[in-house]
Amino acid sequence: MLTLDAFARKTYDSAHLPPSPFGCDVHTHTLESRHAYSTIGECVAAAKAAGLELLGSTDHYSSMLYPVPRDERQYLRNYQYFINFEMWPRVWDGVYVLHGVEADIVDLDGHLFGWDICLTEGITGKAFRWQQSMKDHLWRGIDYAIASIHNDEFTFGATLAQTTNMYIRALDDPKVLIVGHPGRAGVPFDVDAVLLAAKERGKLIEINEHSFAPHYGARCRTACRQIAERCAELGVMIAISTDAHIACDVGRFDAVQALLEEIHFPRELVATRDAATFIDVLNKAVG
Ligand SMILES: [Zn+2]
Ligand SMILES: [Zn+2]
């Protein structure tokens, strides 16, 4: 039964938002992700309302979006959203806008979705002069990728050495800047080894607001907290993000902010604290 109390569970009042404690939100979704509900324009407006300097738009680049087409040539038509980013203003109503993807890790070698999909023609059906993977074709126009696991079936039965190697190999991809929500993925791995591999490459471990949603449970929160604590101890930089799937969640970091305060997380390790810091980290780490 719908009660007035149920309405109070989640409210949004754009006129009375607390200012965001961090300058960037680098993991957000638009309608392109299909289980998300806002346009890029609405996300930018929400970023501005939350006082953000920078918005990273990172829709799912994943097999969860569309069924496998019968003909490989149809793939690009499904994922063509990612080929036209140059249409977006780079500074939109005062907010820096970055072009990203949240790519699924698809195997224990750390490959990312689309690496093995071979393209021979463009969206109009005109033949390419040379074959290329869908990942390479689409990622030319992106600023960075977040590598995440959503479907972990391929990790069942894997050793810790294999899952650790998987994350490290994903970090070796030149466009991957961030390991997405490793505390929530539910795949065990050698935390120190992956954190240090990220540090060595100037890359980032994500602490994700959405992972603290009640439905993920205490185990997920504990795992995320332990990863954050270890990042602080090892001096590993992190990316704070909301993983917003609707504009009104952009720039709202209540749970992560509380956690970082509680564990006295050093602010200089937060790469998303302001736009200049994040862009500097990105320029150094991403090829
Ligand atoms: Zn999603
Ligand atoms: Zn996400």
Image: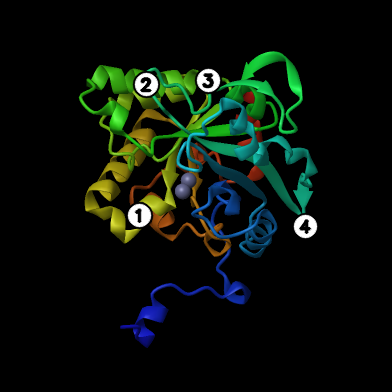
Q: Position of residue 213 (x, y in %)?
A: 35, 58
Q: Position of residue 45 (x, y in %)?
A: 68, 62
- Residue 250 in which image quadrant: bottom right
- How far apart, in angstroms, are the residues tagged by discs 1 and 2? 25 Å
Q: Nearer the viewer, mark 3 or mark 4?
A: 3
Q: Label 1 crowding class (10 Å Cα cut-off): few <14, some 14-19, many 20+?
A: many
- How far apart, in angstroms, are the residues tagged by discs 3 and 2? 11 Å
Dot 3 lies on which element?
Answer: loop
Q: Label 4 crowding class (10 Å Cα cut-off): few <14, some 14-19, many 20+?
A: few
Q: Quadrant of the N terminus?
A: bottom left
Q: Give the residue at mark 3.
A: 173
- How far apart, in angstroms, are the residues tagged by discs 2 and 4? 39 Å
Q: Give the residue at mark 2.
A: 166
Q: Earlier in the sequence, mark 3 or mark 2?
A: 2
The colour scheme of the drawn protein is rainbow
Residue 119 position (above or below residue 221): above
